[in-house]
Image: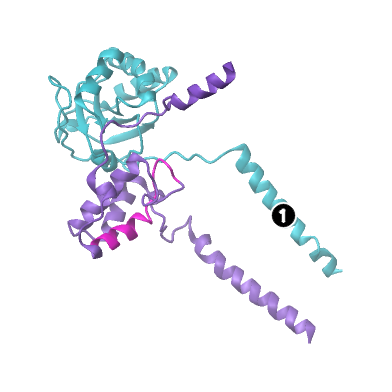
Chain colours: A cyan, B purple
């Protein structure tokens, strides 16, 4: 009698496996790598300017009482070009935006800004991805929301879409 | 004919995903002069996950970002930093995800205990079936 019941055990195990696989297929896991620095202060980074006439990023820049976005971009990144109109709109709404240009050259960044517009107050050059690693960023574009004391409030992975602009601007403006 | 010509065009098409114009860093693909340091860097690189390819270690990946991370590892090893310190610096940025050597934690204990549990079940099964045969 008890042996008969044991006979069903492998089938039950198999069904459990089927359910696990089916759930994972309907709802794939989120593979986005997020920065572990959210909720922590921005690392004190110093980045050389990459475009003449626009400052780079000096340590302490993010702790001057004005919340801002820090956009990590590159002229060679296509989603960054797609994101440009949204950043211009954010700037027009009064949101200050600084940038970190990853593995880029002066000429290429100048072309990029001439073609897609320039929403940035400052652009620091990160030729060896060193600052990208220091920030826990794993690609371009990414945007960090930083409060007036220099604390990272959130990280937006990937390009900012048109329907996300209003909420993002409201969030930055509500920060201390 | 026209189809063939269109297919040929694919050969000269540029990829949609662009890459940086900058050359890769020297230490991304050059070994450290000291073999002991290089071995230590290599060991660490094999247990760090490439962030853009995810299924590969940075030692195995050709991605530009993996190259930069190899250069970072080699620079820090050459500067005398401990492997554990370099790993925890990266973990403090990216979480345990970046490491292929996960610590024992609430999320990972089944990984470590499952083999032991399965081994015990196997021993129990074997004992039962050997006893039956006698």
In the picture, the quarter occupied by the C terminus of chain A is: top left
In this orientation, which residue lies closer to the viewer: A67 or A61? Answer: A61
Which residue is drawn at the image coordinates 79% and 83% (left, top)?
A: B133
Which residue is drawn at the image coordinates 48% and 22% (left, top)?
A: B9
The residue lying furthest to the front in this view is B1
In the picture, the quarter occupied by the N terminus of chain A is: bottom right
Which residue is drawn at the image coordinates 75% and 84% (left, top)?
A: B131
Is A31 on the left or on the right of A75, as rendered?
A: right
The answer to whether one can see residue B86 in this image is: yes
Callout 1: helix, strand or loop? Answer: helix
Per the image, the residue denoted by label 1 is A14
Q: Is residue A54 magenta?
A: no
| Residue range of the region highlighted in magenta in the rendering | B37-54
Is B35 on the left or on the right of B60, as rendered?
A: left
The residue lying furthest to the right in this view is A1
| Residue B74 image point, x, y percent | 24, 53
The answer to whether one can see residue A41 in this image is: no
| Residue B65 image point, x, y percent | 33, 41
Answer few, some or many: residues within 10 Å of disc 1's Cα (few below 14, many 20 plus, some between 14 and 19): few
Q: Quadrant of residue A8?
A: bottom right
């Amino acid at each position: 009698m008890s042996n008969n019941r044991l006979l069903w055990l492998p089938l039950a195990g198999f069904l459990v496996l089927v359910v696990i696989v089916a759930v994972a297929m309907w709802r794939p896991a989120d593979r986005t790598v997020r920065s572990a620095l959210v909720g922590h202060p921005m690392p004190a980074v110093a980045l050389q300017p990459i475009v003449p006439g626009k400052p780079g990023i000096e340590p302490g820049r993010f702790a001057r009482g004005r919340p801002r976005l820090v956009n990590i971009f590159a002229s060679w990144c296509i989603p960054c070009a797609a994101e440009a109109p949204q950043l211009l709109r954010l700037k027009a709404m009064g949101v200050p935006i600084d940038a970190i240009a990853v593995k880029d050259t002066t000429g290429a960044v100048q072309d990029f800004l001439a073609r897609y517009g320039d929403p940035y107050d400052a652009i620091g050059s990160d030729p060896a991805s060193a600052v990208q690693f220091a920030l826990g960023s794993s690609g371009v574009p990414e945007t960090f929301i930083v409060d007036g004391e220099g604390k990272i409030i959130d990280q937006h992975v990937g390009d900012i879409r048109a329907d996300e602009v209003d909420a993002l601007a409201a969030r930055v403006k509500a920060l201390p | 004919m026209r189809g063939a010509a269109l297919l040929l065009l694919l050969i000269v098409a540029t990829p949609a995903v662009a890459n940086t114009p900058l050359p890769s860093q020297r230490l991304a693909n050059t070994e450290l002069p000291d073999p002991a340091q290089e071995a230590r860097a290599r060991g660490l690189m094999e247990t760090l996950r490439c962030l853009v390819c995810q299924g590969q270690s940075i030692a195995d990946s050709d991605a530009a970002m993996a190259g930069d991370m190899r250069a970072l590892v080699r620079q820090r090893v050459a500067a005398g930093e401990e492997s554990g310190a370099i790993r925890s610096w990266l973990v403090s940025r990216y979480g345990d995800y970046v490491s292929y050597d996960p610590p024992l934690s609430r999320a990972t204990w089944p990984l470590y205990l499952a083999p032991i549990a399965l081994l015990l079940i196997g021993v129990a099964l074997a004992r039962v079936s050997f006893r039956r045969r006698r």
